[in-house]
């Protein structure tokens, strides 16, 4: 998913479950986005969320 696709689908403030280790339920944490998504130079798409420093990969988020 591109940053634009993520931003079009999910507004800032959308609740998600964040997995610090993708696919591992014991690492799950309830969060909300606090920024629009953006693309890193590597092509990875990240977004800021509550309770986590820096941007997190949108691949580690599951919409609620």
Image: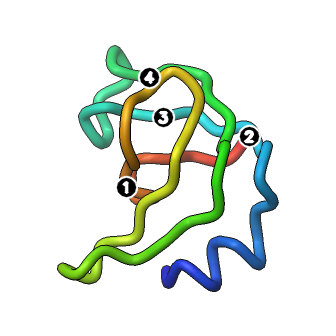
| Residue ID at (18%, 79%) | 42
Kindly indicate the quadrant of the structure image that contains residue 52: top left
Label 4 to label 2: alpha-carbon separation: 13 Å
Q: Could you tell which of marks 4 and 2 lies nearer the N-terminus?
A: 4
The residue to which callout 4 is attached is 28
Residue 61 coordinates in the image, percent (x, y) = 50, 47
Residue 45 coordinates in the image, percent (x, y) = 40, 70
Kindly indicate the quadrant of the structure image that contains residue 23: top left
Label 3 to label 2: alpha-carbon separation: 10 Å
The residue to which callout 2 is attached is 64
The residue to which callout 1 is attached is 57
In the displayed structure image, the side of residue 6 where residue 57 appears, left or right: left
Q: Which quadrant does the C terminus fall into?
A: top right
Asked if 16 appears above or below 61 in the picture, the reply is above
Label 1 to label 4: alpha-carbon separation: 14 Å
Asked if 12 appears above or below 39 in the picture, the reply is above
Q: Could you tell which of marks 3 and 4 lies nearer the N-terminus?
A: 3
Q: Are marks 3 and 4 in contact (CB under 8 Å)?
A: yes
| Residue ID at (79%, 43%) | 13
Where disc 4 sits, the SS reads: strand
Question: Which dot marks residue 18?
Answer: 3
In the displayed structure image, the side of residue 44 where residue 10 appears, left or right: right
């Amino acid at each position: 998913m591109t940053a634009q696709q993520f931003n079009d689908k999910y507004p800032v403030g959308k609740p998600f479950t964040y997995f610090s280790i993708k696919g591992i339920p014991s690492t799950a944490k309830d969060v909300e986005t606090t920024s629009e998504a953006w693309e890193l130079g590597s092509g990875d798409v990240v977004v800021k969320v509550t309770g986590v420093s820096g941007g997190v990969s949108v691949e580690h988020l599951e919409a609620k």
